[in-house]
Amino acid sequence: MITGHFKTDYSADEGIWSNWPKRWGLVAALVGLAIFPFVASNYALLLAGQIGIFIVAVVGLNVLIGYTGLMSLGHGAFFAVGAYTTVAIHHEWPLTFPLITLVISTVVAAAFGVLFGLPSLRVKGLYLAVATLSANFIILFLIEQEWLAEWTGGISGTETPNAVFFGVELVSQQAKYFFIMPVMVLMLLFAQNLFRTRFGRALIAIRDKDYSAEILGIALFSYKLKSFAISAAYCGAAGSLWAYFFPAILPEDFGLNMSITLVVCLVAGGMGRTLGPIFGTILILLVPELLKIVAASITGGDATAQTWVSPTRDILFGLMIIGFLIFEPMGLVNIWDRFWRFMSRWPFAK
Amino acid sequence: MGQFIQYIINGVISGSILALIALGIVAVFKATKVVNFAHGHLILFGAYFYFTFSVVLADAPFMPAWVSSWEPAWLIAYAGDAPMFSPRAAIASWVSDLPRILLGLVGALAANAVLALIIERLIMRPLLGQSAFAMILSTVGLIWVLEGSAGLIWTAEAEQVPALGPNFPIRFQLFDQNLFLFSGSLVNLLVALLLFASLMLVLRYTRSGVAIRATAEDQSTAYAMGINVPRVFSTAWLVASTTGAVAGAILASRNGLSPAIGLFGLSVLAVVLMGGLDSFAGVLIASMLVGILSSMAQWKLGGGVAEIVPYVAVLVVILIRPHGFMGQEEIERI
Amino acid sequence: MALNRRTLLKTGAALTAASMAPGIVRAEGAHWRVAASLPMTGPFATAGQLVAPAFSEFEQQVNDNGGIGGKPIRVEVADSGYIPRNALANFQRAQAAGDLHFYYGDSTGFMELVGPTLTGDNAVMMGSTSFASALSDPANRPYQFMAGPTYEDQFEILLRDIANKGGKTVAFVYSDTEFGRDPIEHGRQVAAELGIDVVLEEVTRAEGADIENHVTKLAQANPEYTILQGYVTGVWPQLIGGARAFGLTTQFMGTFWGMEKIIADRVTEQAGPFLDGYQGVMPYRYFYDQDEAPFYQELGAFKRSVNPGFSGYVTAWELEGRLCLELWKLCMERVIEADKEVTPDNLMAELGSIRNWDSGGFFGAPVDVVDNKIGQGRVYRYDAETRLYNPVSDWIQV
């Protein structure tokens, strides 16, 4: 039985980890995260690293879409800005401390976020979505230009530096994992706490009805821009980690495909919650890989079978998105909530 | 000056194809308030259907010989031994291809219409009443479904399909400059503009056109006035899929059949927003503008720049006019 | 293929193996393992599907002949959809499943992505579909090689051929991809050295190019020769068709991926014989050129024995994949013969020491492997009547 929100003071009421399943769940998750790299293969670590990085980005996107109600299909661009800033910094000053690079990349991405956010003053909804999508294409176009190629590597991409902490170079995926995960956990905590502040509540008010929020005294434009900046900063951090994680980056990594994947992760997980992005990212990034492994073991690595395996995977993936929208529009986190609601009453009621 | 006009012509031709594609997006949006991100993939299916009917089926062993190549005596006499690419040879080969072109077009239109009805019924209708965001995302999901299905049905690309019209170069003089265009492109231009104009007329003067416009104005009032709103939705999707099939056939004959046709639809989305989501006239203007601008960019700045022209243009336009050239401003009440 | 208990168990085992097997625990397997990523779907699906038979047939042929050094081989092919990051995941998944002795990558992007990770325990000998110049670099890419000349070399071969024939002007038309842009810089230099004017450099989309504008620009520049780069199945036929219809007399030329007979035949069949006279550089002999090519004859006989409906022609694309495999096999045999341990370093050392190798068909003359590439090629000309590419130059070494 996990009922009994028995609180004796206000600070307990404000707490995030208000009952024992949450507290122990957190501890278990952290322990699991710490043990995982010692039992996992390189391939599993590749996936884990990718998921960790994506979670950071999707949490950022959640600030914008889930909490502020602004649509964006261009967050791949901030990812790119973060990643290329990291590469450029190491190009100029090869031995920069990784955390400093991470912070600078984050700040640069946030600046781009403000720039992208400018149209949000005049347009909303779909128009904003396409405006950000356009901006994404333009950023990638700039990255591919030859006059920037010294720092970006142009269209053929560029090799990325490894993070060096006090003389220890993070080469193996295991080592990189220990760089990514703490950053991810910290950024999750920050996002979780953001919405317990006046600022976070203002964003939620904007989402629920922007004009009403304005009447309540919330400066729409500045809050929208700040929301853009924060979500871009998250994606910038994710980009920076991405650059450290992968041995090379290509402009095409950060195109529309990435932007849409980020949104899909968010929708599948559930918007406006911190757990949502975690669930959604794990599901969306893992399912195609699992299908690949299952298909490979059924067909035995036969090449011609591959011609129907990947289309089938695409179809299932698309149906999954549509299925979520039709049957579970609140995302995975809603299923999770239902489960715990059930558990908290069990065995007395359903 | 002559060169300038040459690129304007090229731009207008590609603009007309953009307009034909944009037409489908606008029709669906007007009726259902859904922006169809998967329209490009609907076009992809149209192109593949056109290929299936005009090439695979027409050459199938059970088909009578005249379908795959119609060669009556007078046609052979007319063609004579005209050199390749001469108007006469082009017309002769077009006439002999005519049965398969017609078969392809009819088949593509019918098959795409069925596909659109299935999509509308199975995916879009259950989402009625959901947020616009959910509707848009479901069309994004649809992209994967359609792309995967196309991959399952038609495994290989790089096929050639017959053009809608005879293809020979037309040369003429203007301002002492030699200008040229392909007759096939001219046919495409005419087909696109005719379809566009006739649809606008249908919307203005027929009952179902009025029903679509009424639904666009206010869904619940339309319901109350006895308009069969779900039928309006189906009609809109039908319009989108059939014009999309023609667009697909044109694109496939111009550039060859490839899955890249699907992605082309996304750049058209930028064009649609530039014109205004619910305005046919605005979208036509935007299409022409983007076509011409891209062509100019290709001329003066090279291919890389030409590709992002639609995106830059839409950003500029949206910042100045948030609802595009002629889009209707949404009035919000609190 | 039916989903019964056994496949389920196997699936479960594969899942566990893929996720859990730590990289350190590596048992010496009963097979030599070869794995590959191919674009079985996506923009270059045609190419991937045509290359795929090379792998299954190589496996069968080698195992029928007793394997390599008495040990059979196993070949696994995975689909990448031509997305480098997918190929990287495929590669690491293959590595996680046990010792890997050869990998075949499917794009320049993947080779660049995986290159820096090939160190220490993670090193694997690696061939690919790519002829990108950056991959012919033993110092920085010690484990990657290519079974032919780089794109830069191919450009150079074409430009030299043009210079030999007295050409003075040339246009470069290339796709806006890394593959399209690869040799352009080098092409400019070589053209300048040879005294050829580059009158136009036109960038197009990789697919769905705006043919009218490109033809207009070509007509203005009016080059004697036009080199196309960065296309596989699309754009180049439409571009040539447009230019021919317009009446341009420029001589079109292509590089390896734009030189496939099957594509040219298909275009000729469906759209008319306008590709007649199209030229390009090809590092290999076409499969129909079987005189004094025992390997080609043997391969043809094998294909006929497993598939009675075999058309008698093997695509150059498939040959490229097969050649990579053959080179690996050659190195394996030499390493085993010398009684050395089979490690990527030993294999690459053997590869680098290949001199005067008679390939039995692929190349016109015995070849050397220098800088992890084979710098030889020849200019062919397409004949729409006979549907054959016929040689118009000697084998050119670069």
Image (cartoon, coloured by chain):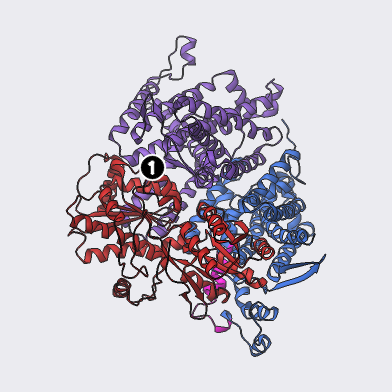
In which quadrant of the rendered image does the N terminus of chain A lie?
top left
State the predominant SS element of the stretch in magenta: helix
Is B203 located above or below residue A1 in the figure? below
- Is residue B293 inside the magenta stretch? no
Residue at image x 34%, y 58%?
C369
Give, as a single range, the part of the protein colored magenta: B46-66
The color chain A is rendered in: purple
Q: Nearer the viewer, residue C7 or C179?
A: C179
In which quadrant of the rendered image does the C terminus of chain A lie?
top left
The color chain C is rendered in: red
- Is residue B53 inside the magenta stretch? yes
Is B107 located above or below residue A58 in the figure? below
Residue C353 visible in image: yes
Q: Is residue B41 left or right of residue C36?
A: right
Is C364 located above or below residue A156 in the figure? below
* Image location of residue B231, percent across then percent down: 66, 55
Q: Nearer the viewer, residue C42 or A15?
A: C42
Q: Mark 1 falls within which chain? A: C
Q: Amino acid at mark 1?
A: Pro
* Image location of residue A3, percent across then percent down: 40, 21
Identify the residue position indicated by label 1 in the image.
C116
* Image location of residue A97, percent across then percent down: 44, 25
* Crowdedness near tag 1: few (<14), some (14–19) or many (≥20) residues, C-alpha within 10 Å: some
Question: Which chain is depicted blue?
Answer: B
Give the total number of marks visible in the rendering: 1
